[in-house]
Image (cartoon, helix red, strand yellow):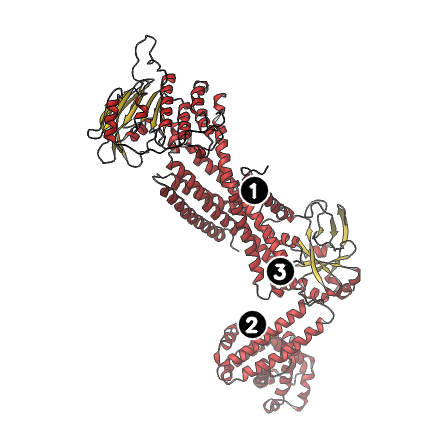
Amino acid sequence: MLRSKNLPLIVSALALAAFSAAAITTFMQRQWSTSAAIPAYHLPDKAAAQISDRTIPVYQIGDLHGVRLVGRALMRDRGRDRGHLQVEVYPDLDDIELIGGTLIWMPGNFRSIRALMPPNVPAELRASVQAFADGLEDNLHRLTDAPKFRELYRPELDRIIGEALQSSLEAPATRAALAQASSSIGDEISIKFFDDAMPVILEYQKAAFAKVIQAGRQNFIARLLNWQDTLTPLQDAFGQSFQDPRVQSALTAQLQGIMTIPETARFARVFGVGAARRLAADPRWPDFIGRVANDHALSAQVEAIEELVAATGKKMLLQMIAQDTNREANVLALNVLRDVLLERSSSFLLLLPDTRRDIIDRVDAENWFLLTRGEVRGEVK
Amino acid sequence: MTQRRPPVTDDAGSIPGPILRVSNLSLAPGAAAALLDHTGFELQRGEVVLLTGPSGCGKSTLVNLLAGTLDTTTPDWQVSGTVDFEGASHDLAHERSKIGGMVFQNFALFDDLTAAQNVEIAFDHSGRDAATYAEPVEKLLQGIDPSAAVRDCSGGQQQRIAIARTLVADKSVLFMDEPNSGLDNAAATELARIIRELADNLGLAIVVIAHHLDAFRDIADRLLVIDTATGEIKDLGKPRPAIVDAALHALGDAATESVDTGRSTPRFTANWATDTCRSPAVWQARFFGYYFWLLCLSPSILLFIGLGGILVGFVSTSFIFQYFPYRDILVPVIQNDALAGIGYVQFRLLIPLVVSILIATRNGAIISADIGSRVYSSQPWAMGNLGIPYRRYIPGNITLSLMLGTPVLCLAAMAISAWFSMQTWHAMYPEQSAYFWREHYFREIWPLDHSLPVGLFWVLAKILPSALCANLISIYFGSRPKKSVTDVNSAIANSIIFSVSFVFLWHSLVILYHFHFFARG
């Protein structure tokens, strides 16, 4: 029996048994589905073409938008199940109804997140964006109005903007649009007129752009996100330039209606968009912004902007990832966001109970696929 | 007193020549003055010869030289002379003498073996028939429990085990280095009777080194005395009382230590007494099993490895998830990759390093202590004298055990580390499935379509050379000459320091090499 002579042997045997148990419950169970039911699902070719990972997460969405990770799907690449998704739910989650629910495949992108958001969240996000835009405009205004900025950085900012405008004006596309606009205006308006009037027009455009950049107008951020709207002040400036006596002296009274001509409007659009793109791509921005951000004389204004960005970013992130229930993090939204930020192509399966089939109606038709079950190996619970 | 057997004669009835003749022998420790200077002696079959002289005169050195058990590395002995033994002549200046069986002063018993096994191992390597020695060995070992550990035997019992062990090695000459040291008068007298019987019944020539000559005076045929003044071995003939008294007077009295003479114990019935020699493979397996158990399977090493795995599994998982900023937001985002990273770090870096360090410290200490104590108690020389392959049985099996056991221990640590990592994570996020942990923890290190873990080569490239070199370092320090227990302790400390330093260095080199040349991007 338990004689002291045998005690070391017994202790070692127990220790080895413990090690073996640890190995079995970890190493051996990394493939937990080998002996369990393995339903295989057919995936449409269009969806299969978008799958880059061999393993796809499976989420279950419940009532009140609660989302949790409940398993994985393996893309079979050999054997009779080739091209099928083998869905494996975690065995220790005992309330997963794989068979009774609807399984859909969705790509990991913003549209999927938006579709799965609770109904109130898009409105909250829009409000956050508007509040951020307003706050940012005020803070940028304070920054660009600061004496130090005006003295040290404003000339450089003007130079960057001016060069972008000049470059856009000289671009072949702009010149072509200009030619179309001039020809549509009529023979009586010659290219020479534009050559005479353009320096004045350019002066007005430059001023308008500067206003845009220093956020002197509302909705600047929204316009940054939508360049169509950005054209409005430029078009306005274009009209104002024609009020200038120097331009007017070059115009006859019948040319007052020139801005109503579609080709002229198109020229303004091509010119404005080209200038904005060149401005955004200017390699001097990082250095310029870096110097402004590190300028002690502007630290108060810069910190205010940083705080605004951080607070708004956190607020919007929480709004996007929050679940209705207990405001817990939506692991699905978080993981999709992560993959989007890391530029990783991803997708996921969503297990919908019958009570939540309404989600399907909110998803773009091209953005999801209903999975149909193929052959099932083993006995499905 | 035992009935004396007449001197052994040849077929013609004449007295044969000496079994051993040492002539023109000089022995000097390095550049120091010679202990023996162009001297010699002879031994006849069935003869018991006492060898005595002042302490440090070279008695033990002389018999160790002849038996081949002299450590000639420290000091660098200067030896010359000739030995004629059983018809062959050996030049001691160029050859190592390996004549006779040696009974060491400190017995040099194998303390990891039982009393019976100490005798059996010598017999199994002698290649001779056991029947010749059955009776004398049983007499020698009467009262000794065969299954007793030798450390539990008294001094007298250990002495008799040592004699029996040397006897069954089937040597025609026995050297006994102060066999009565530590024995009381009764035990010493009994020992003298046994020695006389061995010489008479088996025809052995026995040289007994002794300071206390009284017990052997009646059984000895001759008395040899080393004259320190001239470096001569003087043959004083039959040790008559007057001669012995004179010799004792010259040597002075030495203290004796009383030990018991053996209590009533089971009859000694070792395997060798009835069986033929067993294959050395049996002993190979026995020593391998002993060291594999000691180094790789005993509770302390498993506890050591288990605690290391627990620590790595708990700390690396707990701290990463516990101290993450914005946990509520970031943990769901990063935990897939964090678990994969934890698995990678544990499997590829931390566990191999921790296991290597634990093995280097724990087993390095044990190896250097084991070998150091063997060296300190002359066991390697005793094994060599008995024809037992010391290098194969001891350092060889230690190395083999470690090479086979280290991957197993590493795997065990990985398993326990993974399990504790899983439990730690599950305790922090009880709402999540433990299978989520399994899915991502093994994602990088053991993908589903791999039958073996990825990067197994690099793990083995770290742990096996670490274990091998730590083992060799420990064997080196353990094998260096030991004159005291302090030397053994120093060997243990040095082996730990150098082994662990090597482990750190080797793992750093492999990691740098691996990640610089193979794992970029």
> Mark 3, chain letter?
A
Front of the two marks 3 and 1: 1
Q: Secondary structure at mark 2?
A: loop
Q: Are marks 2 and 3 in contact (CB under 8 Å)?
A: no
Q: Is residue A234 left or right of residue B153?
A: right
Give me the disc on residue A11.
1
The residue pinned by badge 2 equals: A281
The residue pinned by badge 3 equals: A344
Image: B188 above or below A147: above
The amino acid type, in three-letter code, at marker 2 is Ala
Q: Secondary structure at mark 3?
A: loop
Q: Is residue A240 left or right of residue B399?
A: right
Horizontal and vertical percent position of residue B72: 31, 33
Horizontal and vertical percent position of residue B402: 48, 40
What is the residue that sits farthest to the top in this orientation?
B12
Q: Are marks 3 and 1 on the same chain?
A: yes
Sequence-earlier tag: 2 or 3: 2
Horizontal and vertical percent position of residue B51: 28, 26
Q: Is residue B315 left or right of residue B18?
A: right
